[in-house]
Amino acid sequence: MLRHLRHLLLALCLPLPLSAQKVALSLDDAPFLKPSPRLAAPAQHRAMLEALKVRKVRAILFVNGVNGGDTPEGRSLLRAWGEAGHLLANHSYSHWDLNRDDVSLEAYEADVLKGEALIRDLPGFTKRYRYPFLRAGNTLAKRDGFYAFLAARGDGIGHVSIDTADYLLDERLRQRLEREPGADVSPYRELYLKHLWACARFYDAWSREAFGREIPHVLLLHSRLLNGLFLGDVVDFFRAKGWTWVDPRTAFADPAYARMPKNLPGGEALAEAVAAETGQQGFVKAWRARNTGPDDQLFSERRLAERMDQLGL
């Protein structure tokens, strides 16, 4: 009896595991036609589409004009995504940063309309907008003016709840393959999955604190060589961790994604924006203090870059 009581008390003292979580996939900067080693852009898209088809996962792509969305080749690739059942949404034409002083609200809104025009006649088009760099304005006039612009048009915000730095890994991977076309890419895959898991744990905990409940997540990745090679591994990895992939429409239907946070400068990942708006400070410092393992810190772009340097990647 005493042994059973000790075991019970020990169990109560241990941190409870997070419940199985839901996550939706988003890919920014599509179609991203920049020349690439190992897999050219069309082959990257075919690989990603096949990986998602086999695993029965739907994605939402956020499209730019300057990344190839304004070309016949780019539109053909985007059409293939829409016809495969994925969603297409606006990420602006020029990928401007609304927090820059030299980007006016009027010019930014015109650029957003120009971006939407590229995709609104394609299958899968949905009226949702994601800010480039997740930056929603460096002044009250720009932040609230653009919120009003979106509301008047009936456009939802393509909020991100799990931010990542996959583009840093992609840059290093491209550089390696340009120097060494036959290089082993498995170390990049291993570090990529560690980075994503650190980001998922960090932002899931922050979201629970910011909202006081579990929310379905939206994971930010990019249309890049890295995901042309490893997107299937990403899907499998999260499933192996007990997470469930959901339709982006399901995630965005949660009330959390209807928020227009009043932090300034505006934007960033959803938990960060809401925490800044509501004065819930201190999460990041407390998380770092509690989670001190070297892989725990890989949600940080700086720590990720340091690890790549250490590994010679």
Image: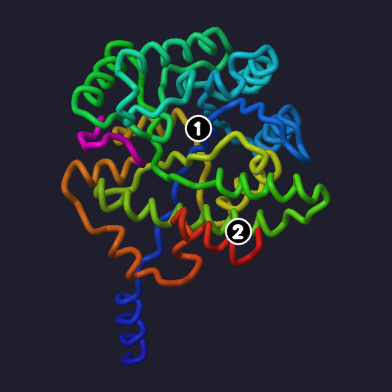
SS class of the residue under badge 1?
Answer: loop
> Does label 1 or label 2 sit earlier along the sequence?
2
Position of residue 90 measured from the top left corner of the image (x, y, whole percent): 47, 20
Residue at x-position 31% and y-position 35%? 267
Examine the residues drawn in magenta and state their main secondary structure.
Answer: loop
Q: Which residue extends farthest bottom?
A: 2
Position of residue 56 measured from the top left corner of the image (x, y, whole percent): 63, 35
Q: Residue at label 2? A: 191
Question: Quadrant of residue 148 in the image?
Answer: top left
Q: Quick check: 44 left or right of 164?
A: right
Q: Is residue 36 positioned above or below 294 on the image?
A: above
**Range of residues picked out in magenta:** 258-269
Residue 168 vs residue 17, the one in the foreground: 168
Q: Residue at label 1? A: 247
Q: Is residue 167 positioned above or below 130 on the image?
A: below
Categorize mark 2 by other alpha carbons within 10 Å: few (<14), some (14-19), many (20+): some
- Does 260 appear in magenta? yes
Categorize mark 1 by other alpha carbons within 10 Å: few (<14), some (14-19), many (20+): some
Q: Which mark is residue 214?
A: none
Q: Which residue extends farthest left?
A: 279
Q: Which residue extends farthest front?
A: 102
SS class of the residue under badge 2?
Answer: helix
